[in-house]
Amino acid sequence: MDIKTLCLGLLCKGEASGYDLKKQFESTFKHFYPAGYGSIYPSLADLAAKGLVNCREMAQEKKPDRKVYSITDAGRQAFKEALQEADPEHKLRSEYLVAMYFADFLEPQRLEQMLSGWHETLGNGVTRLDSIEKGFGNDAPAGTRFVLGFGKAIAHAMAQYIEENRDMLTGTEGSRPGERSRETGSTASANNIETRL
């Protein structure tokens, strides 16, 4: 599924500006499908050119006019068809995992910093998803609740895996010579995320 289809889907829920859509991608979608202005605005322009969305300009004081997009009947139908025909994949891209793959080339202190930083990032992600969930209150659609819950479950499982297996990378057994200390940030980060999960 591409950005254009996702923009159509979000516009099916109500009109929005490119900025509004970017905020949506940075909140609810961030943990599974990030997108920036560089892909959102060209997608909206193409959708408008094809008659799948309408665009109206709203004047703003001391600012450029705000472009607000709304779905057309053709756009709603195109989204439904794209969703029905989708053959979804689950992809994972993680710079942390790339760094861990090459852990043998990292200095011990830097490796500890990365592991603790990753753990902290996951905890921050859970806090962010909790905040989004609270913002919706009891009115959140089932799909939104499912996606937010899935994000929290994945973050929890990843954090737990890091803590249970960091010895694989930092310990004296196996891949790296020399004694490693697990104390650097490990206990603090473990306690930190557990309070959020």
Image: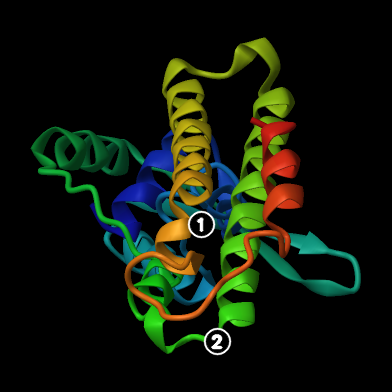
Q: Quadrant of the C terminus?
A: top right
Give the residue furthest to the top. 138
In the picture of the structure, the residue carrying the numbered disc 1 is: 55
Q: Quadrant of residue 133?
A: top right
Of label 1 and label 2, which has the lower sequence position? 1
Residue at image point 42% right, 89% down: 105
Please tell me which residue lies in front, 27 or 189: 189
The CA distance from mark 1 to mark 2 is: 53 Å
In the picture of the structure, the residue carrying the numbered disc 2 is: 107
Mark seen at residue 132? none
Question: Left or right: 183 with respect to 4?
Answer: right
Give percent across and percent down for residue 166.
Answer: 48, 57
Question: Left or right: 54 with respect to 175?
Answer: right
Please tell me which residue lies in front, 141 or 81: 141
Residue at image point 62% right, 13% down: 139
Question: Which amino acid, mark 2?
Answer: Glu
Which mark is nearer the camera, 1 or 2? 2
Give percent across and percent down for residue 33.
Answer: 41, 54
